[in-house]
């Protein structure tokens, strides 16, 4: 897998059992659908951007718990080195977003404007917040954090790469 944009689908927690399986925390909205057919991924350490290609020999669920067996890994000692690493796939291999949803990277660079057509800036990404996600909108070296709530985000048109917002008074002055 060539260097490029990756999407994290799970985090390796620890070895499980004696056969080399690892317990994985799914980081996807549809874990069974994502992992049922997953055969190749990247073991990723984002801080160092260390990537190691990996072939998946099997995945199984036990309730909400996910267990993954990687090709060539047959003991808990061999599996231990994967603890703390992320399981990632290439951006182009993600499952399609559900109807009416989108992935943030699909909208990076999209024009953000108010209902009356005033340009606010370009969508740059999402910042997590305890209350709700905040969309980062930048223009001329200035960033606005726009709460991603239906009362403010009026329309997202992925095909046109356009987002319409109805910000409360003063939001864009912060």
Image (cartoon, rainbow, N blue to C red):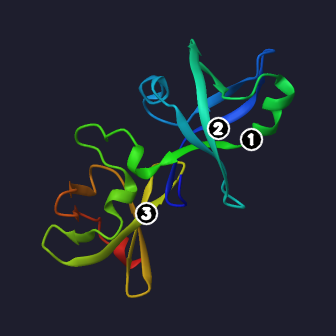
Task: For marks 3 and 2, give the one nearer the viewer.
Answer: 2
For marks 3 and 2, the one nearer the N-term is 2
Relative side of 77 to 11, left or right: right
For marks 1 and 3, the one nearer the N-term is 1
Q: Marks 3 and 2, Cα distance to the nearest angstrom?
A: 22 Å
Relative side of 159 to 19, left or right: left
Viewer-closest of 66 and 55: 55
Q: Which mark is residue 18?
A: none
User: Mark 1–mark 2 contact, CB under 8 Å?
Assistant: yes
For marks 1 and 2, the one nearer the N-term is 2
Q: Marks 1 and 3, Cα distance to the nearest angstrom?
A: 25 Å
Q: Marks 1 and 2, Cα distance to the nearest angstrom?
A: 7 Å
Residue holding disc 1: 84
How far across and down, in percent of the image, does residue 164 sit?
A: 21, 63
Around disc 3, counting alpha carbons within 10 Å, would you say few (fewer than 14), some (14 to 19), or many (20 or more)? some
Viewer-closest of 6 and 119: 6
Is residue 170 visible to the viewer in this orientation of the structure? no
Image vertical order of residue 145 relative to residue 54, above or below: below
Viewer-closest of 72 and 169: 72
Residue holding disc 3: 125
Image quarter for residue 61? top right
Relative side of 45 to 157, left or right: right
Around disc 2, counting alpha carbons within 10 Å, would you say few (fewer than 14), some (14 to 19), or many (20 or more)? many
Residue holding disc 2: 11
Tell me the residue at 20%/70% (across/down): 114
């Amino acid at each position: 897998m060539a260097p490029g944009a990756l999407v994290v689908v799970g985090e390796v927690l620890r070895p499980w059992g004696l056969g080399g399986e690892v317990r994985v925390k799914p980081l996807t909205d549809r874990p069974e659908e994502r992992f049922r057919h997953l055969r190749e991924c990247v073991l990723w350490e984002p801080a160092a951007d260390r990537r190691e290609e990996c072939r998946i020999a099997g995945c199984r669920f036990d309730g909400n718990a996910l267990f993954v067996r990687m090709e060539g890994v047959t003991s808990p000692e061999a599996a231990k080195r994967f603890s703390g690493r992320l399981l990632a796939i290439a951006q182009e291999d993600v499952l399609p977003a559900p109807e009416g949803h989108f992935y943030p990277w699909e909208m990076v660079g999209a024009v953000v404007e108010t209902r009356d057509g005033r340009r606010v800036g370009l969508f740059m990404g999402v910042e997590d917040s305890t209350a709700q996600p905040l969309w980062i909108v930048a223009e001329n070296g200035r960033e606005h954090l726009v709460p991603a709530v239906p009362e403010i985000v009026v329309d997202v048109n992925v095909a046109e790469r356009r987002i319409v917002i109805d910000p409360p008074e003063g939001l864009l002055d912060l």
